């Protein structure tokens, strides 16, 4: 079987460029550049090599690397979330946990079924599963990198001390994953938060901009969630169909080698058509599904921002009411005044930055969608044209063979 | 008397060779109410009466034929039941031309090729109509034959047939030709579930699909049958295609006596196959059998994969449609106008692609999957023909064994000096010598037939597959071209997002 169009290298390089550019307008700022230069996949964890180039004075060197694990990224993210100072910013969403379970299962099943298929079939399937594993691996590296780049690009977050420690401290941060108790606490916190969120959202905002954003984000978030789920399902079906075509191709190949007729020629070309189908599914996955998933998380982050602001607003209004009450009763007036002032400041600070953040969010979103949709269309076209060429040459061989 | 009885049984395709099996068959024949049993015997009779497979003018079996009909007067009335009686009067007239055909064909393959080039017959099965109500309802199909061949009485004939008529045709052809080594194309399978839905009157998509599937399968079946040069000239086939009234083929019902008998005989055949150890002297047959075994395995695997693909593609189309809807909703809620428009466009593209996937899955199904199913069944018929050859060989060997025994008996009698019994013994020896010769001739004939049939089958197979694969590839090409069109239309929209 000769190797037809081997898109291998192109595919990889596209993916390399892809992740960093999910958010288009990241200025490649010379003062701070972060990327993940390497990654190692061990038994059940992935070790990322975070490489930093910076001209900022607070770093000891201009260029350095550290090794980090997924939990440490989560720790960094959570530290941002818990920091009151950053209440007015959209915190870049945390990267999802690396999940190789499905792929590992498939590899295991392949290993078990080794006896039941021919050597060629086995090596072929092994190659494909390994390619799949590699793709998932690349994706998780990309997700982690995007998170770091977003933080580095944010004017305020990039100055965060924890972030600098994360980048520079070359020992293990000894961040353990949350134990059961802490996870339970988190769970309850989330429940309370979502109940509160509903309450807060019910409060009508004086500012039109924020009111509009609130309604918009709520609807948008739900729609993105649905679109993301549906696109996942679609891509899964597509992968299933591609798997079937795989199997058909290998059966045809066996048939071709056993059969003495000239149907063999067809059997040789069909396998490449199926490679293309699988790649179409993979590309759709990358451009469309991942985009939607990312914006699902980002819109959630934006919603969180709005929630925080809403909470601050409610607090402010409550403080106002308390102050009025205190003044009326002429008791604890000073205390009420200070509380009110604090709330007022907090609220205003959040509102100021939130407005800008939300506008940035929109710009980023539009740009990312544009880029990915254009790339999706281009890839689909490329694959369809390649497929077409292959099929036409196949037809030519078969028809001319009478 | 006993020997002629055994002739008749040996003639009967469905019956096993062993005496013990014969007893089993006899037992069942006795337990079944007579009309049904008679149906079997009618089948039994027809191979004998359509004897011309033997070129030998000294056809011993010609006598046997007469004896059978004399033997069993109670079977006479049965001849008026079922379709075979319509045939028996015809056969005496047809025998001589038939013999000619058979004389010609083995020696003149080139002539046969020529005939095939002028093969001019078009058959279509169309217009399924539901007749009747409830559980007694059935579908009737219009069979249209357009031809310029002389054996047909008219240029264009239209008749109405129901599914069991097709099954009846197949079972008659199988009983007449299979044991000669002819590959008789199998009819489409019964489907109780499918038919029940149609009978009950559900007008949903699955029953419409089922009827369409069946109609297409019946058409393919008829086309394959008439492509076979011998089957084309068979009076049963001609009658099926031309006569407006066809008597009901009752014996095709699964739960009839004939049906049960068929099942029993199939089981007996399977047992026999395991016990017959044939000394294969001809490497060609061994090689071919192995080849067909492999082909069978691969085709079944392929068929299963294609069916799975059809299923997944349907799923893909459903999911694409729902994704298109959600993308449209996302576009609606997006407040950036250009992006919103682009997302709606994406939704439209995806919807069109969904339609494409659906069409593609129909192509997958009707072109490839059905063809594969047909070939899986055809290969079973081919394997059956090889089995028939094995049976012929076994019969020949059995005859040789009997001859040996008779000779020994005669030798013993010579010692005992019983002249009257001696005469009988000598007669029997002559009889069995004849049988041995006949057995050998039959075996060689069937081997020759099989070689020819397999050659024809292979040629047809390659042609069939090529035609279908070309059609399939063309449908794939069309799909890709459409995809290109859609995405090219979308690209500027995506680029226009500012």
Image (spheres, coloured by chain):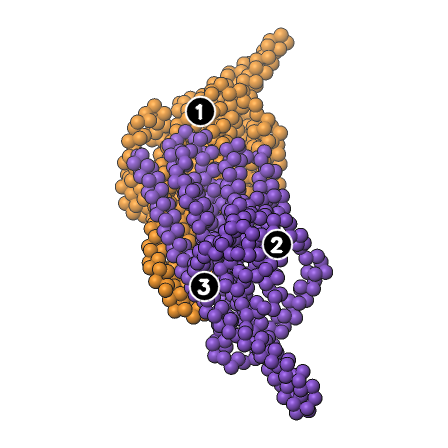
Chain colours: A purple, B orange
Q: Nearer the viewer, residue B375 or B200?
A: B375
Residue B485 visible in image:
yes
**Rendered view: A361 above or below A138:** below
Cα separation, mark 1 vs mark 2, equals: 78 Å
**Rendered view: A320 above or below A196:** below
- Which residue lies under the disc numbered 1? B447
At numbered mark 1, what does the secondary structure look like: helix, strand or loop?
Answer: helix
User: Circle 2 marks a residue in which chain?
Assistant: A
Q: Nearer the viewer, residue A38 or B142?
A: A38
Residue B433 appears at what percent x and percent y? 50, 16
User: Circle 1 marks a residue in which chain?
Assistant: B
Residue A35 visible in image:
no
- Which residue lies under the disc numbered 2? A72
- Numbered disc in front, either 1 or 3: 3
The quadrant holding residue B485 is bottom left
Cα separation, mark 1 vs mark 3, equals: 76 Å
Query: Where residue B462 is drawn, which disc sits there?
Result: none
Same-chain status of marks 1 and 3 = no
Q: Is residue A346 left or right of residue B383?
A: right
In the rendered structure, are the residues bearing label 1 and label 3 in contact, judged by CB atoms less than 8 Å apart? no
At numbered mark 2, what does the secondary structure look like: helix, strand or loop?
Answer: helix
Badge 2: residue crowd in 10 Å (few <14, some 14–19, many ≥20): some
Badge 1: residue crowd in 10 Å (few <14, some 14–19, many ≥20): many
- Which residue lies under the disc numbered 3? A365
Residue A178 appears at what percent x and percent y? 68, 57
The residue sitting at 41% across, 29% down in the picture is A260
At numbered mark 3, what does the secondary structure look like: helix, strand or loop?
Answer: helix
Badge 3: residue crowd in 10 Å (few <14, some 14–19, many ≥20): many
């Amino acid at each position: 079987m000769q190797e037809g169009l081997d898109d291998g290298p192109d595919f990889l390089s596209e993916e390399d460029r892809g992740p960093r550019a999910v958010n288009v307008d990241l200025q490649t700022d010379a003062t701070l550049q972060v990327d993940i230069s390497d990654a190692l996949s061990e038994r059940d964890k992935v070790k990322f090599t975070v490489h930093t180039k910076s001209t900022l004075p607070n770093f000891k060197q201009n260029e350095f690397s550290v090794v980090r694990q997924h939990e440490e990224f989560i720790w960094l993210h959570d530290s941002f979330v818990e920091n009151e100072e950053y209440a007015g910013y959209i915190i870049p969403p945390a990267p999802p946990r690396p999940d190789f379970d499905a792929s590992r299962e498939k590899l295991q099943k392949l290993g078990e079924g080794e006896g039941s298929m021919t050597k060629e079939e086995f090596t072929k399937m092994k190659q494909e599963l390994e390619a799949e594993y590699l793709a998932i691996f690349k994706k998780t590296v990309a997700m982690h990198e995007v998170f770091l780049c977003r933080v580095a690009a944010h004017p305020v977050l990039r100055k965060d001390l924890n972030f600098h420690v994360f980048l520079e401290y070359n020992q293990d941060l000894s961040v353990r994953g949350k134990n059961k108790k802490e996870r339970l606490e988190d769970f309850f916190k989330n429940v309370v938060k979502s109940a509160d969120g509903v309450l807060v959202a019910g409060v009508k905002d004086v500012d039109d901009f924020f009111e509009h954003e609130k309604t918009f984000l709520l609807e948008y978030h739900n729609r993105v969630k649905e679109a993301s789920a549906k696109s996942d399902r679609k891509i899964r079906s597509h992968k299933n169909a591609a798997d079937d075509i795989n199997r058909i191709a290998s059966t045809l190949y066996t048939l071709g080698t056993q059969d003495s007729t000239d149907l063999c020629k067809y059997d040789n070309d069909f396998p490449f058509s199926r490679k293309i189908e699988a790649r179409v599914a993979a590309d759709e996955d990358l451009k469309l599904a991942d985009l939607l998933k990312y914006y699902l998380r980002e819109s959630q982050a934006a919603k969180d921002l709005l929630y925080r602001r809403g909470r601050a607003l409610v607090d402010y209004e409550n403080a106002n009411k308390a102050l009025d009450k205190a003044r009326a009763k002429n008791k604890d007036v000073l205390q009420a005044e200070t509380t009110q002032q604090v709330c007022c400041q907090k609220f205003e600070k959040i509102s100021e930055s939130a407005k800008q953040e939300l506008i940035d969010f929109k710009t980023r979103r539009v740009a990312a969608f544009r880029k990915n949709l254009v790339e999706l269309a281009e890839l689909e076209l490329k694959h369809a044209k390649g497929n077409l060429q292959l099929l036409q040459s196949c037809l030519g061989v078969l028809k001319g063979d009478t | 008397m006993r020997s002629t009885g055994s002739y008749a049984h040996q003639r009967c395709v469905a019956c096993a060779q062993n005496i013990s099996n014969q007893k089993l068959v006899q037992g069942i024949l006795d337990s079944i109410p007579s009309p049904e049993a008679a149906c079997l015997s009618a089948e039994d009779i027809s191979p004998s009466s359509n004897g011309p497979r033997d070129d030998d003018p000294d056809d011993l079996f010609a006598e046997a034929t007469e004896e059978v009909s004399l033997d069993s007067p109670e079977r006479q009335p049965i001849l008026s039941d079922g379709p075979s009686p319509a045939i028996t009067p015809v056969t005496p007239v047809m025998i001589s031309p038939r013999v000619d055909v058979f004389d010609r064909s083995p020696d003149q393959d080139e002539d046969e090729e020529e005939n095939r080039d002028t093969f001019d017959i078009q058959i279509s099965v169309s217009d399924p109509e539901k007749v009747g109500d409830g559980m007694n309802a059935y579908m009737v199909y219009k069979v249209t034959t357009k031809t310029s061949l002389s054996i047909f009485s008219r240029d264009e004939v239209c008749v109405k047939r129901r599914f069991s008529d097709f099954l009846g045709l197949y079972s008659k052809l199988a009983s007449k030709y299979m044991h000669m080594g002819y590959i008789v194309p199998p009819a489409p399978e019964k489907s109780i579930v499918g038919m029940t839905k149609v009978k009950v009157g559900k007008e949903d998509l699955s029953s419409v699909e089922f009827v369409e599937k069946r109609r297409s399968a019946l058409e393919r079946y008829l086309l394959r049958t008439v492509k076979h040069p011998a089957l084309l000239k068979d009076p049963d086939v001609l009658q099926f295609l031309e006569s407006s009234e066809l008597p009901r083929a009752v014996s095709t019902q699964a739960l009839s006596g004939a049906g049960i008998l068929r099942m029993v005989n199939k089981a007996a055949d399977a047992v026999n196959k395991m016990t017959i150890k044939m000394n294969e002297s001809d490497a060609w047959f061994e090689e071919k059998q192995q080849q067909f075994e492999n082909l069978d395995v691969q085709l079944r695997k392929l068929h299963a994969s294609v069916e799975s693909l059809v299923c997944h593609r349907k799923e893909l189309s459903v999911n694409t449609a729902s994704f298109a809807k959600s993308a449209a909703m996302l576009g609606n809620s997006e407040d950036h106008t250009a992006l919103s428009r682009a997302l709606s466009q994406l939704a439209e593209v995806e919807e069109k692609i969904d339609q494409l996937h659906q069409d593609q899955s129909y192509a997958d199904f009707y072109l490839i999957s059905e063809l594969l199913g047909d070939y899986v069944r055809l290969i079973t018929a081919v394997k059956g023909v090889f089995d028939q050859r094995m049976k012929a060989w076994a019969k020949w060997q059995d005859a040789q064994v009997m001859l040996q025994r008779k000779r020994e008996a005669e030798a013993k009698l010579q010692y005992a000096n019983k002249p009257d019994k001696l005469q009988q013994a000598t007669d029997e020896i002559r009889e069995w010598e004849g049988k041995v010769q006949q057995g050998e001739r039959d075996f060689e004939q069937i081997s020759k037939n099989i070689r020819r049939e397999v050659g024809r089958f292979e040629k047809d197979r390659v042609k069939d597959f090529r035609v279908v694969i070309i059609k399939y590839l063309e449908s794939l090409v069309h799909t890709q071209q459409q995809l290109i069109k859609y995405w090219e239309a979308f690209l500027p929209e995506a680029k226009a997002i500012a």
